[in-house]
């Protein structure tokens, strides 16, 4: 019938391969196609990518095989999401009343979607380049202002890793304030157990003695106490008036650190008014999900007096080249990358993204809104306490904010009954339970609790019916009277439209990976793929308390186990700890493992740590924090560790040698040929090899720390393994170890943990982070990355990362000297271009090039590290050839701009580099006094005509800001005056 | 023991109210606080908001009570999400092999997160203001290029509502091409049943006769056939060669419309090469989720010859004031808002957001990637067919692409067995099943199907094992040979980073609600809250086929029923149809209900529709499409309908009166006092009252269409009920009716539907949309809005919307005449400012003001509608006083700029308004020849110094573009030349 529709079968055959799922991931992550790979390798003088790799990675350390027992072929994006859904279904979200520093919170959806799920916020780098970071700098200044307002102390940093480590940082500040002369630090027993354990662990390296004391038993008479840590409200809920206590401490020259709670501080007299010297805590419950432990932003506030001793990044107000207000990071000389082994903190990556979320939570609710939430939480706790008394249950008689302490005959039985109602309680001891309320608690939840505590007996009242009987439990003397969050920013953006636009207004000022490549050497700013990010905001991952029974977190546990296995395969190690929540925390943890190992063998004296001069500043800082003596070794002209010098150092210190810290490939971007020899020298002299895994992106699938000979290493999951940088955190720094070190991996006082896979026996070094598995919520990112890439995809990633770096080095070498290379003339996954010559020929410094790059729409490479006067470029495998070319074009064009100065055609002091960056306000000014043209300043490359990212300020004056230090929002009137002046 | 920690209980008591959940929604949506409400009312001369409302909304139509039987108090955001999760859990996601125009697809996560879940894309308005819309204009041009490339026809529009209505639009084009002289339209029986029914329904109004025919039975001899619709591949999968068929049709002067499938067209000879005149279809399977029926972008392509007859919006290339390429909407004179009752299509809101997603899908995969997917889908279908033959099942012997037709003894039994395996099949008839494969099908799914069809018998092979035996089923004569998607845009952005940046680059050019208020009169650009948007991308809502058994969609069904009830309460109607998927589709559906009602009563002659001259263009267009005769009535000086004229018209036509279409409050922004009289006049003369619900934002909770006296009305859920505008769609236009009209509400040929709540009996008018409940996926937005606001929140929204409009009118009235007001001097929720005077005094037109507003960071109000020479401003309730003030400040400042011209201080032809907008390229140009300063052009208001949105082009030349019509991407070489020229 259909004869007029003629057709002929074809005989093309189908291959099974062609029927495999089509949503494969590696081609979305790795940029270069096969064709491009060949072309680019050829341009570097090699006939194929593989021969470039062979010439680059020393044969002696190349892996023979690399395969996973799971996910080896790589899951597709669809399969990955299915797998994560399966894991998610194995997590059971119970209502948590556990408290202990972690509370459920309503993440405002507008913040969830527009910050936490928004690549324009989560792919930003730490705001070192202030002119293209004014948005998050403002948000972090909001954070600092929120912290100073609520704590009543004038200085805050822009976040720390968690409450426990913040307390440890405060302890170390006390030690420093007392110039290391008073070696006892007291911790009140009403602090969270994880806080206590972290401080105890941390104290070891500072040679401090930490004693846990009952407040009433404190005795300062020996004069050896540098500081004391108390908690307000206490871990079991009580609110104590520390006024007299602090006076007494001060009278004995003892500094007082208070751990506190931001929500409580909206209704409680602030620690600053009580006289506290330092206040620490977590901003988690300000709209950041619990996430089974993190990431969250911790805070640390102190007085002006101690500001230069504060750890972490601090945002400050300064001015730009036109004299207009502009923000930037302040007092950078305090930081570990400058102070190295003189540093007393190693914090680098912090929790910027989460600090931004918490600050926006305060912006959205405003002071009144926050107080309303606090009063509600307090009211629910009060209703609960009244109800329990009615049920005949004994309730602790001290005032409380949100946590009620209860005596029962069998605490475990009550907790088990609660679990049957889908509720988790904290069992303090066999007879004690605490119940902590939060923003998400409803009256019906209180009714459920009544049922639990009534133990089957009928309850003759409801929470609602009790409410009118309930009175505030906060003592009048401790009621907050001072205002807070009075700045207009906290009193304006209370509707969703207003907050949405505020978030977008800030966002529009910041350059992120959504705009262009961010080729920061040593930072590995690669693709943070959406599929990787999706599970991070699923409720079955976000809404679990870190101390929930592990049976309720089987999805997480399965992922930890799988991830541990995968990381072991990748690194050649035997066991992993997922506890350290940043790279530097991993360094510290790894060195503490080595320390514990030596101690366990009776080698108490082994405390020398050899560190090459080229090491990242966190390395010496971490070693110092472990009480190690740092011995530096130099590098040779090729950038390699000076092996004779190393051998001499090792031999000299052989009786006391603890460890070598080595970065591989080196921070100079070279695969040192002598790495196996280096490891051997250390081992031969009784030391352990600590490898800094920051450069793992050049190793995965090609070689591994374990294979090379290291004993322990940390991984920056926020570099090689795709956790986005979040504008300065979160990160994760798990550590892997060889078998002999596995017993010493950290544990946790509330939820015992250890190596994954678990070693036969365990002698944990202590506790590193507040949560058992660090920032568990972001582990799905690295996990999905590895699972989707599979072993081949990952190996290709390493190869292409190396290819991309070599391709760029090749394109740039005729314009800029490339500083270090391997034996065959290639570089690793990053390389250094040398700008030192331009200082003489043109008065140009690296900063000028970095700022001018902004005019081209780019974030500058790593500046003057590891070698002053240079730029270190790391393209990663996720950048396309087109993007690499665009960046090279920009640098080459800038080189021509420098040549104009060299030739005398441009003024050495007043040229397009010194004038950079050029914000619109300047470019559109009626007056134009520059010796170069506006268009030359604004549109130096053709692609900028199609779309251009605009820096929002002129060059920011760092010196001015540090001389006139302001680290909080200025009063509205002052800003208004400035604005008026600016637009007059 | 704690005596040194003194504390005193306070006696502040807790109220139950204070213990209610704190994440309430209305205060996030409605802008004005109580305090602001009073202040703003006072500034309008009223002592309170309520007295302003009393003075504004006529007493006679005020509701006495307004309460919901469900959600009356409003859910909090947290409760809402819980409720939606509960509904989601009642939807069961089965694997769909149903086909029929809906296929599962992998939405690329980078597109999901950065477009579908990104307010910067979904809150954009239709790109009428080209200079701040170049991003989505480019994306829509990509869409058009993709359609023209794949169909092989040179002209495409930028989306239609769905495949079925696109076919109906094509039918109407055929009618027009033949000048209405050939009144038969043939539809091949191999078209989807919903397509056939929509065309049949639509034909009635055009007086066309639609006949469904077997292709072999076609007879053109009567010469009355205007066109014929065939499907390629057919609904049951067969691929026919239409070459000869089309020649024959053309020989008889018959136009050929082909419904086709984009994925198939990557491997099949394109319809254009076969000679088709028009091609229609759906772009759904290009990365847009099925969503239980929509929203998806349909397409329509045709030849140059018929371009001026094309329905819908068309993007075209033009130049800006500096002669640089710039995009804008082309040939707007074709559209209904210009042609009114001469229009042959009423399409207005289309599916821009989904067209963008589909275009980005093609950009991401590129031509090779798309072909790979197509070949894979085809291969899986081939494997299935081979397997079935091996199982002894009869498989249709015609070539197929993705759908295999199978004969079985009991189709229902097989389908039931499939359901037990979590699989849905299409039952064509008792002995026929079709199985359609898609991008998400895996080899294992084919194995499952083998199990189903083996009926319990063991299967001795697997899909994988069969693959090598399988040959392509596509006849060589129909294999695609011509290239497609050759433009670089489709061959560049294939990694996630590249696509991410492309999406963000386009986004950065477009102003959206993320930047500032978009006060478009009649468009109600209000907050699209995140909580409302979240369920829209949950898999249990996205991944359901519209024809899946309703038992699998109980969550959806429950929501439909609740929503129907809520909308009935809001409108005062008795039953709702959720089928129309845009406002204009609702108008058409509502008028068709009236038509059916008259017909059912034997009133065949009732075909006169009275429409005020001030009505939106879609009203007369819709009425014309129903075959009605339009009688216009004028308005009086106050903007009210001229009642005597109306009465006269009604009486004159009383024997033939079908309906009145009336917008309330009027399109002039006034609550007409005579509205009850108007309704009475119509009813007295045998007509029905159709109310255009576009202005429902001024009614909800205060009055209602049903209460006022209307018989039917449509709601633009994308206005009053928070579905975002998506840059020109999606929308939803459900209609509500009084009891007597309920039986006539539309049904659906595949899944019978009708009014919600269901009327006692039903005589459906036919089918309006391709899916039974229209764009079901976006209904959660309106549903959650209503449920979170509760009756009081919604009423407050209406009041504040009115307040905001009056506040602005008051602020502006000393600077611009406010054109119409109610009896007490107030305006409704929007108002008109009159610019006509400036034409004489300063040579200024509304366009100049709208373009200059861009320099102030704003999207202009509705221009020259409903009154030429005016601007209509609608602030909505979601805009804060601060934002209203900023907008007023901008307009007042512009008024001063006009005054400068009036005073002769500025040149009448060369001033800051005529020169607007001012893009950076112009402002930073080395040459500046304007008589005003750069800063005056760029920073006319202080807030612009803090953050400014930059227009990316100078004023776009509409006339040039229409004279030199280009509606696809230009070849790369040409663009390169232009870029080179631009940067030379
Ligand atoms: C080589 C090296 N080691 C360690 C670190 C510290 O890691 P983190 O910032 O995660 O603490 C960095 C950070 O840039 C680094 O580059
Ligand atoms: C008064 C009025 N009626 C009808 C419509 C058409 O609605 P839609 O664009 O959803 O088809 C509009 C759209 O702006 C309108 O303003
Ligand atoms: O396009 C309009 O919505 O009028």
Image (cartoon, coloured by chain):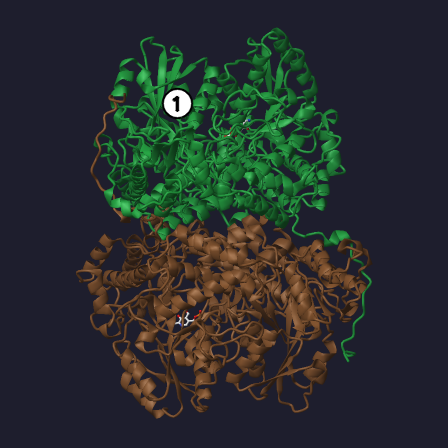
Chain colours: A brown, B green
Label 1 SS: helix
Left-right relation of B52 to A468: left
Q: Which residue sits at x=60%, y=31%?
A: B816
User: Residue most toward the front?
Assistant: B457
Q: How many marks?
A: 1
Q: Is residue A500 visible in the rendered structure shown here?
A: yes
Q: Chain of mark 1?
A: B
Q: Quadrant of the C terminus of chain B?
A: top left
The picture places residue B150, in percent across and down from the top left corner, at 31, 34
Say above or below: B268 vs A596: above
Q: Nearer the viewer, residue B397 or B844?
A: B397
Name the quadrant containing residue B872.
Answer: top right
Q: Nearer the viewer, residue A398 or A298?
A: A398
Left-right relation of B431 to A797: right
Q: Which residue sits at x=77%, y=55%?
A: A462
The picture places residue A129, in percent across and down from the top left corner, at 43, 62
Left-right relation of B207 to B690: left
The picture places residue A443, in percent across and down from the top left corner, at 72, 54
Q: Nearer the viewer, residue A818 or A571?
A: A571
Mark 1 — residue? Answer: B170
Name the quadrant containing residue A224.
Answer: bottom right
Left-right relation of A54 to A717: left
């Amino acid at each position: 019938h259909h004869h007029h529709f003629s057709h002929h079968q074809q005989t093309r055959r189908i291959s099974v391969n062609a029927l495999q799922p089509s949503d494969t991931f590696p081609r979305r992550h790795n940029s270069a196609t096969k064709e491009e790979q060949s072309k680019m390798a050829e341009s570097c003088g090699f006939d194929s990518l593989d021969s470039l790799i062979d010439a680059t990675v020393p044969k002696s350390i190349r892996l023979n095989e690399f395969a996973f027992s799971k996910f080896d072929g790589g899951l597709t994006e669809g399969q990955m999401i299915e797998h994560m859904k399966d894991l998610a279904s194995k997590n059971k979200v119970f209502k948590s009343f556990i408290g202990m520093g972690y509370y459920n919170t309503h993440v405002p959806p507008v913040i969830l979607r527009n910050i936490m799920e928004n690549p324009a916020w989560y792919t930003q780098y730490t705001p070192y380049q202030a002119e293209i970071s004014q948005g998050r700098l403002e948000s972090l200044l909001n954070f600092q202002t929120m912290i100073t307002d609520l704590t009543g102390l004038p200085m805050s940093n822009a976040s720390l890793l968690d409450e426990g480590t913040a307390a440890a940082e405060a302890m170390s500040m006390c030690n420093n304030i007392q110039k290391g002369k008073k070696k006892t630090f007291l911790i009140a027993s009403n602090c969270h157990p994880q806080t206590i354990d972290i401080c105890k662990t941390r104290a070891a390296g500072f040679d401090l003695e930490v004693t846990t004391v009952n407040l009433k038993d404190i005795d300062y008479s020996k004069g050896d106490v540098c500081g004391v840590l108390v908690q307000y409200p206490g871990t079991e809920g009580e609110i104590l008036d520390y006024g007299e206590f602090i006076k007494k401490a001060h009278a004995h020259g003892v500094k007082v650190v208070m751990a506190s709670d931001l929500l409580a501080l909206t209704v409680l007299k602030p620690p600053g008014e009580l006289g506290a010297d330092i206040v620490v805590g977590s901003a988690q419950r300000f709209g950041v999900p619990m996430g089974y432990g993190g990431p969250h932003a911790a805070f640390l506030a102190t007085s002006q007096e101690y500001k230069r001793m504060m750890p972490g990044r601090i945002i400050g107000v300064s001015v730009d080249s036109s004299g207009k207000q502009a923000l930037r990071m302040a007092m950078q000389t305090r930081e570990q990358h400058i102070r190295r082994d003189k540093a007393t903190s190693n914090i680098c990556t912090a929790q910027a993204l989460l600090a931004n979320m918490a600050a926006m939570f305060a912006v959205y609710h405003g002071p009144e809104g926050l107080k309303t939430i606090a009063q509600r939480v307090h009211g629910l706790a009060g209703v609960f306490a009244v109800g329990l008394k009615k049920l005949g249950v004994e309730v602790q008689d001290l005032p409380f904010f949100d946590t009620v302490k209860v005596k029962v005959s069998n605490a475990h039985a009550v907790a088990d009954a609660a679990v049957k109602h889908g509720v988790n309680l904290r069992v303090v001891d066999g007879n004690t339970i605490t119940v902590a309320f939060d923003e998400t608690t409803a009256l019906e939840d209180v009714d459920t609790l009544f049922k639990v505590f009534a133990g089957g007996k009928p309850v003759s009242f409801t929470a609602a019916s009790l409410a009118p009987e309930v009175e505030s439990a906060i003592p009048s003397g401790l009621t907050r009277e001072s205002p807070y969050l009075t700045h207009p920013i906290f009193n304006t953006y209370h509707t969703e439209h207003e907050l949405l636009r505020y978030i977008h207004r800030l966002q529009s000022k910041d350059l992120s990976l959504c705009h262009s490549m961010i080729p920061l050497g040593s930072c590995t700013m690669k693709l943070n793929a959406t599929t990787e990010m999706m599970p991070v905001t699923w409720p079955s991952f976000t809404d679990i308390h870190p101390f929930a029974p592990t049976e309720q977190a089987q999805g997480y546990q399965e992922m930890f186990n799988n991830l541990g296995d995968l990381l072991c395969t990748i690194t050649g190690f035997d066991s992993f700890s997922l506890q350290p929540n940043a790279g530097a925390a991993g360094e510290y943890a790894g060195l503490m493992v080595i320390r514990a190992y030596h101690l366990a063998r009776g080698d108490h004296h082994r405390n020398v740590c050899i560190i090459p001069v080229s090491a990242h500043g966190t390395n010496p800082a971490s070693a110092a924090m472990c009480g190690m003596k740092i011995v530096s070794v130099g590098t040779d002209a090729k950038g390699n560790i000076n092996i004779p010098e190393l051998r001499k150092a090792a031999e000299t210190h052989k009786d006391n040698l603890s460890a070598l810290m080595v970065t591989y490939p080196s921070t100079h971007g070279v695969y040192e040929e002598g790495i196996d020899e280096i490891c051997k020298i250390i081992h031969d002299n009784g030391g352990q090899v600590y490898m800094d895994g920051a450069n793992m992106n050049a190793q995965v699938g090609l070689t591994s720390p374990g294979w090379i000979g290291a004993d322990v290493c940390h991984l920056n999951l926020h570099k090689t393994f795709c956790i986005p940088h979040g504008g300065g955190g979160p990160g994760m720094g798990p550590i892997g170890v060889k078998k002999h070190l596995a017993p010493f991996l950290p544990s946790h006082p509330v939820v015992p943990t250890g190596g994954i896979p678990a070693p036969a026996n365990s002698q944990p070094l202590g506790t590193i982070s507040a949560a058992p598995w660090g920032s568990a919520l972001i582990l799905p990112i690295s996990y999905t990355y590895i699972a989707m890439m599979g072993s081949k995809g990952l190996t290709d990633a390493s190869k292409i990362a190396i290819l991309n770096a070599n391709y760029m080095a090749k394109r740039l070498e005729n314009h800029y000297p490339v500083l270090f290379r391997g034996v065959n003339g290639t570089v690793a996954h990053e390389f250094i271009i040398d700008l030192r010559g331009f200082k003489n020929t043109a008065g140009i410094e690296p900063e000028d090039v970095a700022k001018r790059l902004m005019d081209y729409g780019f974030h500058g490479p790593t500046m003057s590290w590891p070698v002053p006067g240079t730029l270190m470029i790391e393209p990663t495998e996720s950048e396309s050839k087109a993007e690499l070319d665009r960046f090279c074009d920009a640098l080459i064009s800038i080189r021509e701009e420098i040549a104009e100065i060299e030739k005398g055609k441009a003024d050495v002091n007043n040229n397009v580099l010194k004038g950079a960056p050029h914000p619109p306000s300047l470019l559109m000014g009626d007056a134009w006094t520059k010796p170069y043209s506006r268009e030359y300043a604004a549109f130096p490359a053709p692609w900028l005509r199609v779309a251009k990212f605009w820096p929002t300020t002129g060059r920011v004056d760092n010196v001015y800001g540090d001389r006139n230090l302001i680290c909080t929002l200025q009063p509205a009137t002052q800003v208004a005056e400035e604005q008026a002046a600016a637009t007059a």
